[in-house]
Image: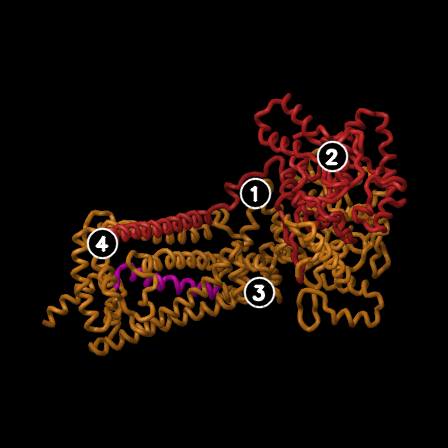
Chain colours: A orange, B red
Amino acid sequence: MKHPDNIDCGSTCSPKRSSLLLKAGAFLLALVIMFPQLLYAVDAENCLMCHRFRGLARVDKDGDYRLFYVDETLFNRGPHARVTCKGCHADIDKIPHDNAKPVDCLRSCHIEEPTREIIFTHEKVRDALHDSVHSPTSADGTPLKFSEDFPECKDCHDIPLFRPVSIFKKTRAGVSERAINRCTLCHSDENFVRYFYSHVTTRLHKSRDPREVVNMCASCHGDPAFARRHGLSDVISSYLETYHGKATLFGSTLAPDCLDCHAGHNSVHEMRAATDPNSGIYPENRSATCNTQDCHHSAGPALASFDVHANRNPRANPLEFGVGLFFVIATLGILLPILTMNVLGLVRELLPSHQAEKEIERLTKLAEKKAAREGGLLRFTGPLRLQHAFLIVVFVILCLTGFPMKFPNAPWAPVIYDLFGGINGAPIVHRIAGVALLVGFAFHIILILLNVRRSMKQKGQRGLKDWIIAILALPMIPKWRDLKDLVVWAKYVFFLSPQRPAYGHFSWKEKLEYLGLFWGIPLLGVTGILLWAESISTHILPGWALNVAYLAHTYESLLAVAHIALVHIPGVIGRPGVSPFSSMILNGKISPSALVEEHAGEVQGFDMAAEVDS
Amino acid sequence: MSKKNHRSKQLFLVFYVTMWSVLLIGAATWLTIYLVGTLGDPLAGKGLEPTDAQVFDSILALTNKKVVRYLGEWEFLEPKLPGHFHHIGRWYQSDKSNFCIDCHGPIPHSRSLQERAFLNMHNLFISCQVCHVRESESVAPDHFGWVDITTGRLCSNPDIVEGVWGEYGAKIVPLTNHSENPQPINLKEEEQFAAEFRKRMNNVNDSQKVIGNKFIHRKCIEKPVKCSDCHNTENEFLPFTALGYSEERSAFLVSAEVVDLVKRYETFYMPNLLKPQQQEEGQSIPEETP
């Protein structure tokens, strides 16, 4: 639900329209006034007579924009709703307000702490802060270097707003009217009941959304100059690259934000340095911090060596840098040469040699004859087409549920993710699709092996050596001829030779793509399962193995998608003369012209077969 | 015909090959930049904050820097003002119709230190001309209307209801020729000149700037309307009821509460009367020259 008082009428408001909007706004405002979250309005001094105007502002000589506006609707939706203006702005006691001091959040305000009827104060926060890494002074009171960088109340907090939670039967955001009705049966003041309900239930879950918490911490820790001054690493970007950070960006309130790991149990203000033995992230305490009932409850102590803030900085994280470097080199080393050659191949298509054209004409006639004789040229059998279709579906699902997670800040990411149920649904779909891919892959291998065994039986072969020979003889296993084809092709695209490569039934490109699956699927599968079952993984592997697994999974996924998107799909539908709507994917039949162009060697085989027949 | 066909096929082929080539080269370039960018220290190469970062933040806050407040069952986007504790919700609708704002901005008052925020607050619903401009120096306007702040055209009285504090999508303007065809005070010449003047700002010398400023502000009066001219119980400068304010609201605007508040500010400025020059400067019309 959008906050009704924040409807911006925009710049195209005509008077009549604006009048209508104003009426609507007034009506909505009235609704808001009646709305459950509006609780107390304490303005005995009538400060809002002036401060309710949005234009009450000035610019200081230093260029600071000072706004004196108070959004009363928003103000009344938070725990400060019962505090009078003077409760905080205590030194403002005359009009005009003269040299008002900054508000001291630790002062005693004019509200009674209900359990003991004493005046309320945030003073205890000072003690927690003083004992934390955010204290601007050392234990003996000496100001630290760059003490001005250390946070004051307003650096982390703006005025809090209630985030009530309904816990009647099921937990969800908002006020439970049924729970309220239970209270108002006895308590006559509904305003107080709603305030009390919101006050308590806000504290039963995260009182600030994890995204706001991360943004708050990032205002300092995401600032490169700040990080340099204090010798800190980039903890924000590294956190946002973990599943924790990404889930948070997608709106998960269950994923841990900075406070969940770094803040003490008694107060979020008890933030301690990683070198402090009392800190939750102190190496010896990490295991206990991660291994809680709400988080990785069955994880082994090895999880402690998982580095949440690892990046690919060669000095700080040489292992992660090495893994990243390997995949960057692998990805670019595979794709860039192929793409370069493919683009050159496309250019070569503009200027085909006459010699090649003549050969193509001859072979096309041959292939057409065979096609006429056999009712088409079957290239892929039914089971292969079925497996290919299965692979497409699973691959697309994996991309759609995986890539938003890889690029969570992209504007398209939440849109796609929401199609699969957002952060609570998409990861499950991703895992199901991943398992399906692994099962399909295993099924494919079993089919191949069964075929090999049948073939061996027919030939009366047995034993390991024969198995190896039979497997190496499979059509998708690269042969010496493929290397020769590659050389011919390179010469052709560089205009060094007029001769086109005459590929057999499978070209070296197709074999490379096919064998790529034997690298990519197991790698993605194994790393995916390790990350999925992170707690179990830590019983067999050290925590840092999950850092490696994450990197392998994320880099390999990009390699796979890039290969499919830039090499496979353009190679299938992007070549001149090949229709994007080729029906080969459905009926498995290839046109004679395409067969000649792509597998001239196979057509030459028709020629020889015809001679033998004759 | 066949030659034509051949040529069009060739052209199509060139287009086809070019399209795919550009697509693939672009994708490969992006991939390379992205992948190489994933390695190394994420902080390396990031610039330091500018020295006037705070001012810069303040400027950003007034333009497009917004934050989302996630509150479970509802969320909203609001401008982020550095160091501001209270929630803002949103900015007010900007005035597109008044050319004064092109130079002076929407927060023009800055010299009278205690009053300036109040005066800026009145900018929400009162145009500059009401207090600062006269068609004739000696004749104060006695008819007022509302101008749509988007179109700049005269419009009917907006609904002035509780809860919409000063944001009516329109501003009060002084009217001329009210008996026959009431219109806002004619400042067309000044407006056109000001627009041209702004364009040529970099090519005029200081003397020319003074002359230009004088011309633009030639209808501005030395002593603008004071707070107490409207907020008094005897003779209000602005006819609140005729402008659409309810009887209750009109009465409130001249009530003891408001009048007393205004008097307090006047009392506060009494010492300034001892410094006529400074006082005059504090009330002078053009706050900032372009």
Residue occupying image coordinates x 78% and y 53% = B161
Other-residue count near label 4 (Cα within 10 Å), few / some / many at <14 / 14–19 / ≥20: few
Closer to the camera: disc 2 or disc 4?
Answer: 4
Closer to the camera: disc 1 or disc 2?
Answer: 2
Residue occupying image coordinates x 24% and y 75% = A455
- Residue under pointer 2: B110
Quarter of the rendering containing residue B189? top right
**Amino acid type shown at disc 4:** Ser
**Amino acid type shown at disc 1:** Pro
Same chain shared by disc 3 and disc 1: yes
- Residue under pointer 3: A296
Chain containing the residue with disc 4: B
Q: What is the magenta range?
A: A506-530
Chain containing the residue with disc 2: B
Same chain shared by disc 1 and disc 2: no
**Amino acid type shown at disc 2:** Ser
Q: Is residue A43 visible?
A: yes
Are discs 3 and 1 less than 8 Å apart at CB?
A: no
Q: Closest to the observer: B262 or B167?
A: B167
